[in-house]
Image (spheres, grey):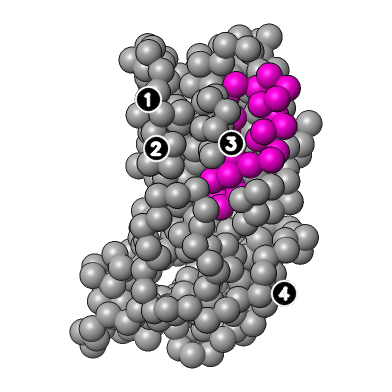
Amino acid sequence: MTKKLLQMLAALTVFTLFAASCGNNDDSSSDPAPTAAEESTPADDSSSDPAPPAEEKSTPAEEDGDGLRVALILPGSANDKGFNQLAFEALPILESRFGAETAYTEMMPVNEFVKAFEDFASEGYDIVIGQGFEFGEIAEEVAPEFPDTIFLVTNHPDLSGPNMQGLQPASQDAAFLAGIVAGMTTENKKIGGIAGFAFPIIVAQMEAFAAGAKSIDPEIEATLTYIGTFDDVEAGKETARAMISSGVDVVYHIADAAGLGVIQAAREEGVLAVGWGGDQTEVAPDTLVTSQIVDQTLLVVEAVQAVYDGSFDGQQRFFSLTSPVLGIAPVRAVDNAAEIEAKVAEVEAGILDGSVEVPLILEPQ
């Protein structure tokens, strides 16, 4: 434990005693059991299929005597070119910036979440990060047992405590912008959205995507589907194909590795796709019109920075469109890209000044 971290936790404890300060976990995930893997960064695979699953690896940095120990728990593949991979890519940055020793697990089954948190905390890791909304309840259960460890949970809207914190980007705002792109590129007035699970933060983005498109043309039809997996590439592909066969000509995903199947189906069928997480253009350069940016790399680095510099306060943290965590990738693959980007900029300004209101819908409609 670093000296800075000890001082900060002590201060927070005193504050809690005197001030009395202040996500459902969906067990329906069917992640495969973890298997041993190489101690390396996932290969840069430009194909649509993720690499075979792996489990626990350590990537220790050279000790500088004051480095943090940071562990990351991924529910999916560390090379899904999306949600999990972006968090994984924060680890080498933490090593170089803070001299951190890092470790991670991937493809972690839901029934092992608690054990993963407890194991890393018992091993003396200063920070344990759960990548995804579903880790919120786990943090609330485990954090009181390990007061010297800070637990961070990404994509969670309501998690605060002396040694835990939720990190929530206003993803629905970026999703609304992605919907603007879809609304300006669909020719059939039919768009589709495919997501892994109906977690509230995911539902909010799916509904905002549809609302953004309909703000361009109220006659646009939006088909939104939750496929019950983040890992099954074929499930994503077949669901997208079914949508496309019904006339959908722009398809959007929030489905991690399964989302690669969505993009692949759009490419094979000659329709447009909207990616999610990072800029996924490399997956389908000719048919991926844009990607909704939710930069989990930067999200993780900024959260760890706050712990390292002593500004961590245990309060829920939000990231808006003013943060580089959120945004839209450049518009490509269409002739009117400049017109679309100008409209996106106009709407983004409206969201920030309050003249455009993005609906916050947390349950499927």
- The CA span between labels 2 and 1 is 9 Å
**The N terminus appears in which quarter of the rendering?**
bottom left
Tag 4: Cα neighbours inside 10 Å, few (<14), some, or many (≥20)? few
Q: Which residue is mark 2?
A: 281
Residue flagged by tag 3: what amino acid is it? Ala
Label 2 with label 1: CB-CB less than 8 Å: yes
Q: Which residue is mark 1?
A: 332
Residue flagged by tag 2: what amino acid is it? Thr
Tag 1: Cα neighbours inside 10 Å, few (<14), some, or many (≥20)? some
Q: What residue span does the magenta drawing correspond to?
A: 237-262
Report how many numbered discs are placed on residues in the image. Answer: 4
Q: Is tag 3's residue or tag 1's residue first in the polypeptide sequence?
A: 3
Numbered disc in front, either 3 or 2: 3
Give residue 265's mark: 3
Q: Is residue 218 magenta?
A: no
Whole-percent x, y for residue 261 in the image: 58, 44
- The CA span between labels 2 and 4 is 34 Å
Left or right of 113 on screen, residue 58: left
